[in-house]
Amino acid sequence: MVLAAVLAGLGVAASGCGIQSTSVPVDAGAAPSRAACVLPEDESNGVGPGRAPVRIYLLCGSRLVPAERLVRLPETRHNFARVLLDQLQQRPDQQERAAGFESKVPSDLLVEEPAADDPTGTIRLSEPLDTLPAYALAQLVCSYAESGAADNDNTVLLGGPREDEDAELRRYTCGTQLRNEPKDAASAGTTA
């Protein structure tokens, strides 16, 4: 009898936890993150002959945050796109992981040669854009758009494999909306 009264009391207490039920779906965004999303200043600049810092975008929590990497600079825009992709595919270093950074770019993704009739600056990927994870697409868009791989207007023209007849080229810009909501990358571009 006492046990039943205690259980009934616990049931009443638990039902009054302050969270009201609702018939309307609520999207309150991603759960708060304890990740710092800030990297310590690098005291060694590491810049040397043929090496320069480049900015890539990594995922931290549910948003994109810039990170700097040192790379050997290639001579062509197309090869620069490959270098950036390689950096996005690398596992974040210890400091980046400690700050909460990660990358969603698939390790088997490649930058392919553009088609003969593609506009100058087109970056073709080995996977159709609509099959890439949204976070990976956002990382690629922002890393390319804010680099030497982009057009002069800081937009990037992306496409899937040349062989995919249905694949259209899409033009993307890396704005605040995309950096804060990378899950929306699939709908961020415009048909070129």
Image (spheres, rainbow, N blue to C red):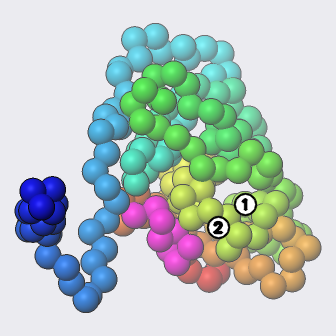
Q: Where is residue 71? Give x, y as percent.
A: 64, 27
* Three-letter amino acid code of the residue under disc 2: Leu
Q: Residue at x 47, y 47 (%)?
A: 59
Q: Residue at x 52, y 40 (%)?
A: 102
Magenta-drawn segment: 181-188
Q: Residue at x 62, y 42 (%)?
A: 88
What main secondary structure does the magenta stretch of the protein show?
Answer: helix
Q: To which residue does mark 1 refer? A: 123
Within the magenta stretch, is there residue 89?
A: no
Q: To which residue does mark 2 refer? A: 157
* Three-letter amino acid code of the residue under disc 1: Ile
Determine whether 153 is above or below 23 in the image.
Answer: above
Answer yes or no: do the residues labelled 2 and 1 have beta carbons within 8 Å? Answer: yes
Q: Where is residue 70? Give x, y as percent.
A: 58, 25
Within the magenta stretch, is there residue 187?
A: yes
- Most foreground residue, 92 or 67: 92
Q: Secondary structure at mark 1?
A: strand
- Most foreground residue, 164 or 51: 164
Question: The N terminus lies in which quarter of the figure?
Answer: bottom left
155 vs 34, left or right, is right
Q: Where is residue 61? Give x, y as percent.
A: 39, 48
